Image (cartoon, rainbow, N blue to C red):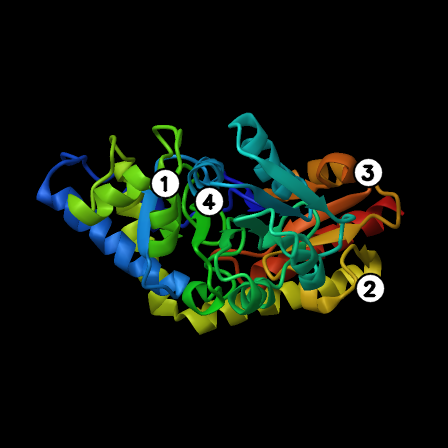
Amino acid sequence: MSKHLFIPGPVDVSEDVLEKMGTQQIGHRTKAATALQKSVSEKLQKVFYTNHLMVVSTSSGSGLMEGAIRSFTKKKAAVFSIGSFGDRWYKMAIANGVAADVFKVEPGRHTRVEDVDKALATGDYDTITITHNETSSGVMNDVEAIGALLKEKYPDVLLLVDAVSSMGGVKIDVDGWGIDCCITSTQKCLGLPAGMAFASISERAYARAKTVENRGLYFDMVSLYDFVRDKPYQYPSTPSLAHLFAADYQLDRILEEGLENRFERHLNMARRVRQWASEHFALLVEDEKYMSQTLTTIVNTKGISVADLNKKLSAYDMALSNGYGDLKEKTFRISHMADYTIDDINELLARIDTILEEAE
């Protein structure tokens, strides 16, 4: 029996979605493959609230993150990090010889608009990267406000956003917020198996990338863009057709639920976990405005063994996540994303309550 994974991803995948992964293969250069990727792309545009061209990548979201900072940075990137995954974008830049500076905050804090303004006022940067939803800390940045700043004062600076753990669980208005490249992957809020990533690319980001040298090969955003636009709806190499079949089906389910309904369901689950955490422990993020709606990081004020808690939860075929990095055992994390319901969350919390009561 599979576990219910209340972790930052991967998450449980519905059986009918898994069945679509077993669809018989087709030639990846056929009209049928073009129609499949076109269908997935058009549905993704609705989820992303964008008219920008969509690209797919047979990789994790990290692949497209690396491709984005390498392809879209001509002068220098300002990486705004609120945790481990913001740090990763900086490491990607350095590993690829891309000039970049990193601006960090303490765990549980968000990226302030005034700090972005101060950095960009130097004129040193032509690209910024933002983590929308940081799963190590449970912080959700105000990307809308940051995008508004760029529109008003820095219209030539590209905005790249990591929405790996939020797209499909929270409304992200890509076009309205002025996001030039928004990246997500399959294994979190979209409720699909791990192994594929998606990104929207603005025309001006594409134009910038064409002027950047040494963009690499597999994650070259120009190549990915050109194959979608010109072939059309093709992938430079062989894509995971299994993921595309499953995505095409799951995106129908997401749109049938209704995006606003889906976002409301995620928010209700988040509020329930926050309520429980506040009663029994404490929340790492203090300002509700910046609390993630897809994952909650809980401060381990009781000093319990999170590893032991997980072992006992496994008897109920459940798992949550320990703290990440330096926050291990100091915090633990409960995800509330994808196709989970408030009933699933209540069952998990009841099991934890029972385990804690028995340990007293």
Disc tally is: 4
The secondary structure type at the circle numbered 4 is: loop
Q: Position of residue 11 (x, y in %)?
A: 51, 46
Crowd tier of the residue under label 3, counting other residues whose Cα lies within 10 Å: few below 14, some 14–19, many 20 or above: some
Residue kind at label 3, given as amino acid type = Ser
Residue 54 % position (x, y): 32, 52
To which residue does mark 4 refer? 187
Judged from this view, the residue extending furthest toward the left is 31
Q: Residue at x 71, y 49 (%)?
A: 137
Residue under circle 3? 305
Query: Does label 2 or label 4 sit earlier along the sequence?
Result: 4
Circle 1 sits in a helix, a strand or a loop, which is it? loop
Whether residue 274 appears in this view of the structure is: yes
Relative to residue 245, is residue 357 drawn left or right?
A: right
Q: Residue furthest front?
A: 123
CA–CA distance in space, label 3 to label 4: 27 Å
User: To which residue does mark 1 refer?
Assistant: 211
Separation of residues labelled 2 and 4 (CA atoms): 30 Å
In screen coordinates, is 58 left or right of 140?
left
C-alpha gap between disc 3 and disc 1 = 52 Å
Which residue is the site of mark 2? Answer: 279
Residue 38 numbered tag: none
Instruction: Answer with mark 3 or mark 4, whichever residue precedes in sequence.
Output: 4
Badge nearest the viewer, 4 or 1: 1
What's the distance in space between the residues labelled 2 and 1, CA to CA? 54 Å
Residue 347 position, x and y percent, is 63, 57
CB atoms at circles 3 and 4 under 8 Å apart? no
